[in-house]
Amino acid sequence: MSIPLNPSAFAERHIGPDRPGLQTMLDVLDQADLDALEARAVPAAIRSGAPLDLPAPASEVQALAELRALAARNRPMVQMIGMGYHDTLTPAVIQRNVLESPAWYTAYTPYQPEISQGRLEALLNFQTAVCDLTGLDVAGASMLDESTAAAEAMTLIRRTARSKSSRFVVDADTLPQTLAVLATRAEPLGIELVVADLTLGEEGLPAGDFFGLLLAHPGASGAVCDHRAVIDIAHQREAKVAMATDLLALTLLTPPGELGADIAVGSAQRFGVTLGFGGPHAGFLSVRSDLQRQLPGRLVGVSKDDAGNAAYRLALQTREQHIRREKATSNICTAQVLLAVMASMYAVYHGPEGLTRIARDVHGRARKLAAMLTGAGVTPEHEHYFDTLRLQVPGRARAIAAAARERGVNLWVEGDDVVQVSVSEATTDDHLELVLGAFTGERTDGADTAPGSALPRELTRTSEFLTHPVFHAHRSETAMLRYLRRLSDTDLALDRTMIPLGSCTMKLNATTEMQAVTWPEFAGIHPFAPAEDSAGYRALIDQLSSWLCEITGYAAVSLQPNAGSQGEFAGLLAIRGYHRSRGDEHRTVCLIPASAHGTNAASAVMAGMSVVVVKTAATGDVDMADLKAKIDQHADSLAAIMVTYPSTHGVFEDSITELSELVHAAGGQVYVDGANLNALVGVAQPGVFGGDVSHLNLHKTFCIPHGGGGPGVGPVAVAAHLAPFLPTHPLVPEAGPETGIGAVSGAPWGSASILPISWAYIRMMGADGLRAATLTAIAAANYVARRLDEYFPVLYTGAGGFVAHECILDLRPITKATGVTVDDVAKRLADYGFHAPTMSFPVAGTLMVEPTESEDLAEIDRFCDAMIAIRGEIDRVGAGEWPAEDNPLRNAPHTAAALVSEWTHPYSRAEAVFPAGVDPAHKYFPPVGRIDGAYGDRNLMCSCPPLESYAGR
Ligand SMILES: *Cc1c(COP(=O)(O)O)cnc(C)c1O
């Protein structure tokens, strides 16, 4: 056999090319087998040689059985803990047709808007729901969680507040995990947090200046207070005000915008997204319109296409880190799109009356419980609350919580004297009886619902919300089902075509890997439940962590960061913590190659470092002479270098070990951005070939689907000397080292409920399967490079003429000669039924192609054939046959509607929509034509448009 690797049966399915297909690719590369390719393509200095020490691969049946056994060790209880996480009832139509639908979960971030209108509309609905409910003007398309959203609000305020103070005041009734994340984010930036008891109103505010204020509405204790006076005073002192809030409560309560707040943050979790041991959930952030250009993360807006029809696209893209880099306002890249889509659909399905009814039920049950407990002699501490009762029970708190657990209910306990009970949509009258029993020790008949409300009258919501027809049109399940299908049908996701996105690793998300995510034993666990409830989760986390250490060659890993960007921030804080522990506070310079991903520079700034850019040599490698010069120049203050390996140029650089030695010799640490780990798993280990710390993207290399732009998991893996500086959690000490750097996410293990996906992938692939996947990905990229080089020159290759797992196609000479741009080619690919490759990253005017191991030869050839046909079209433009301003490329993509309007183009309708290789029977038509992004940015509209402007569809 010419392919000496022996992957498991699962791996044979995960890996796209069959043996003859792989052999064809290897023949083109003139390599006998994958081992030979490895020897030629991967520098000897980094190859590990020894196989990974992982358990023998499990079959799909066996892996599911093991996951079932792990699940059985978790204990889903009636969750009445609250503290930012509430039980919810996911409508089955949304669970099955969004969360479990590959049309939604395998989609990519909607950077190519013409093929992403469905998810863009869903995100616009999310933004509209958040704006309406919070009473503010503009909301982004999700944040990573509530706590990081609060931290983003803090830094947004600092950028925009007129006050020059460095103090940020935080309501003492803020969620403890949010306070912890704020502290982690504040310290490196020199922001001083002042915690203040603002239930006292104005009296509670500290004397002196502060630049901003975070209030809680309702508070972590459940209290609902009228903060208007405090907000006014903060504004008088030139500070801006953010409010952490709860979307469900806001159906009944005066929203932050009407109270005078400038910003609202929170979590949309209780809109139909299960607890999942802490995540993933969509955080939100909304602002007044004067702050809209400062919003972190992605923002969907309405623009128009080339036919003048309304069309969606990401607005203000210039805010992205790739352009702003170290001046970026935030490092957030992957967010929580899939969960935002779920929350938006929950709002669409229930509408304003449905949401209000749910909120009234929740509030009614909370009142009923208050009456029952008062009857039993325990009166809630707060007069005004929405869903959470705080109860003073001197000396009895633990006994009551234990009695509740015996009855199957989890409560929140604070010390010996305080219990909190939080009511959710899933709470029943029976649950209230169980809680009462835990307080009284007996079964009692509860009092009837007390009349009236425990919300302060002056905070009663009077304004309308969710008035747009979309929140009224899909109430029957049939209508909802069809709406979801209609939206996803307008999009191209992995269930229709390869998505050859360099740096993003859009590989198979196997169905078996997805299955455990919605099992109640994983979905129903509260992140702050007693440890024994999550024994299965903890075992899975330990196993996955040890496998990731084995794969990377590092000593320890934290799964807390919920995207690659957050892993970068955590890793840089670990480096910072290490230097400080040695008295090296002055080491603050972070070297970053010019080709780095934009998040790197933004993360370094967030970690209090100053960025020094290292040049790229003509070969595309890090310019070693410039590196040496920069190291000399900053030797005393060098903190770290951040390099991506293989580089963002898609090349294994021979110089990595030398680079690492130089930086270490100067006292710096080496951060290896692990986003390209799909080129390394089973072949080389960053922790061995020179790295001190890496983040991984489980949503790239380890099969968590992209979800249209999230969720993700960005574990940070470190060498032993950095292990004491991993993230921690204020409520769950086992989640990190005692000496750690603080929390970077609200939940102890971040987006825990999607970890079974990566666990299952590694478990079923085994060491040989993972190595075969890596080498097949390298073979596929090199095959694409060889097939396309003659048509679109491959910009960079390594020493042996090979690329790594992706290749950059240089269109700049073609653009110069013909006027046809990367944009034109990207849009034209949609006419051929493909998602475009990565555009203009890391080099402007190029396309970066990453086929991954999961695409079979036929699909790779279909893509190459399309690219070659497009080159033929470009040549006709170049030859003057088609004018530069009117040709199939410039007018791409072509809609069905365009065909039946007057046809004046110098090419035929068939050439427009059925170019070579496109089967008319399986033709994909984008719903809109080329979108004018600049128009939308000039006329910013980021919530649901009035229907008239939307008439095109
Ligand atoms: C994707 C990527 C990141 C950022 O990861 P997110 O999960 O999107 O935050 C960082 N570096 C590189 C090279 C990447 O490709």
Image (tube, rainbow, N blue to C red):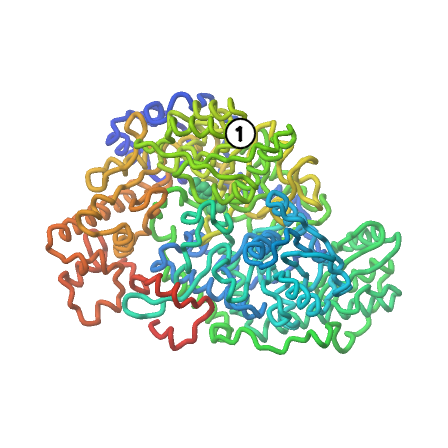
Could you tell me which secondary element the residue under label 1 belongs to?
Answer: strand
Residue 250, position as x, y percentages in the image: 63, 69
**683 or 382, nearer to the observer:** 382
| Pointer 1 residue | 669
Residue at 52% over, 43% down:
603
Residue 9, position as x, y percentages in the image: 43, 36
In this view, 731 is above or below 796:
below
- Say which quarter of the image contains residue 906: bottom left
**190 or 378, nearer to the observer:** 190
Relative horizontal placement of residue 748, taking residue 850 as reference (left or right): right
Relative horizontal placement of residue 31, taking residue 741 as reference (left or right): left
* Figure quadrant of the C terminus: bottom left
Residue 601, position as x, y percentages in the image: 47, 42
Label 1 Cα crowd, 10 Å radius (few <14 / some 14-19 / many 20+): many
Residue at 45% over, 49% down:
706
User: In the rendered image, is residue 1 in sight?
Assistant: no
Relative horizontal placement of residue 271, taking residue 15 as reference (left or right): right
Relative horizontal placement of residue 497, taking residue 473 as reference (left or right): left
The amino acid pointed to by label 1 is Gln
**535 or 224, nearer to the observer:** 224
* Figure quadrant of the N terminus: top left
In this view, 50 is above or below 517:
above
User: In the rendered image, is residue 37 in sight?
Assistant: yes
Residue at 65% over, 72% down:
254
**876 or 269, nearer to the observer:** 876
Number of numbered callouts drawn: 1
Residue 496, position as x, y percentages in the image: 35, 53
